Amino acid sequence: MQFGIFTVGDVTPDPTTGRTPGEHERIKAMVALAQKAEAAGLDVFATGEHHNPPFVPSSPTTMLGYVAARTERLILSTSTTLITTNDPVKIAEDFAMLQHLADGRVDLMLGRGNTAPVYPWFGQDIRQGIPLALENYGLLHRLWREEAVDWEGRFRTPLEGFTATPRPLDGVPPFVWHGSIRSPEIAEQAAFYGDGFFANNIFWPREHFIRLVGLYRERFAHYGHGTPEQAVVGLGGQVFMRRTSQEAVREFRPYFDHAPVYGGGPSLEEFTAQTPLTVGSPQEVIEKTLTFRESFGDYQRQLFLMDHAGLPLKTVLEQLDLLGEEVVPVLRREFAALRPATVPDGPTHAARAAGRDTGADGPAGTGAPGARRTA
């Protein structure tokens, strides 16, 4: 089981002080969070991709390349790479380059994006979001696996004998998660390729995501990649911790009430009841996170959103200390004790490269027994 954090890189005023960080400050804060995540013993740091205010991470591979040079162990990922508005050729080359720079500590999460104006900025139409996602990934999948690609589709110029460079490290493409908050077509796509499915379940009720994950697992087995239990699932979540729940609620409430993504909707209490958001003590975070298994089955990656809603960097770093010292060690033990031996571990480059060499890898090259090779 892999634990980590993801950031969407929002620039949000602190409602308790009225202060808004500048873009430079926010970008440097994201780097500081990645370094802190490694120091705290976490496994993954992931950044979103946005091209509109109030967000700053428009170039995830630039950010992750910088972080790669300042970390040694951390898996570097995205919490969305826009498969709809990025050219698949550029994604193939950028992430293969990042693989080499980071010695394989790289994967990525593909998503459509839900900001309508971004599509025309990159010459696309949001009404074609699903067809774009399906076609572009079909090409990306081939570019990482074939030396000379002949290809023709609806949304970009044809390719003839094209070779993306550099080639993936050790001949193993970066592991791909397909992220979705609402689209069964994306769950189907993840299942078809034997890739991972990430349900970023931070805003919608649990029941919606239970259906999406269930569909992905069912179709993963349908396509012959293994049993439904061997499908590779990731989940999101948000936490805010203090020593007592009263302290946590009192401190976090103004951030919840005024943040653009929360304010004006359900109350803090209603939102925490319906979503993964946990505001309380470390023990409460442990207890709620363990319930995710009851809803979604055994899964491979848990990412927490912690640097949002205008929280100052100092506060977020304190959260990471609590997460690394008091929460994640317990979650590792508890999830490991419950997980059957046939359920795969979280994907790593080393395990997938070893599986490729021995022919013993399981779904998506994660090393799980009992499934045919798909990478």
Image: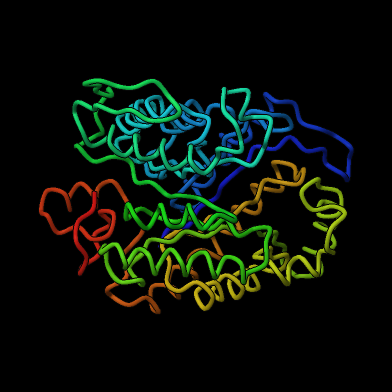
Residue 186 located left or right of residue 228: right
Residue 297 shown left or right of residue 287 in the figure = left
Foreground pick, 115 / 130: 130
Which residue is pictured at 44% across the width and 56% down the height? 197
Above or below — where is 158 with respect to 264? above
In the foreground, 336 or 167 = 167
- Residue at the spot 47% in from the left edge and 57% down from the top edge: 3
Whether 174 is drawn above or below 21: the answer is: below
Q: Position of residue 32 (x, y in %)?
A: 58, 36
Quarter holding the N terminus? bottom left
Residue 150: quarter of image: top left
**Residue 327: x %, y % from top left:** 55, 65
In the shown orientation, is residue 252 left or right of residue 229?
right
Between 221 and 153, the one lying in front of the other is 153
Q: Does 282 sit above or below residue 265?
A: below
To which quarter of the image does residue 269 belong? bottom right
Q: Residue 290 in the image: x percent, y percent?
A: 54, 74
Give the farthest residue toward the left.
358
- Residue 264 on image: x %, y %: 88, 54
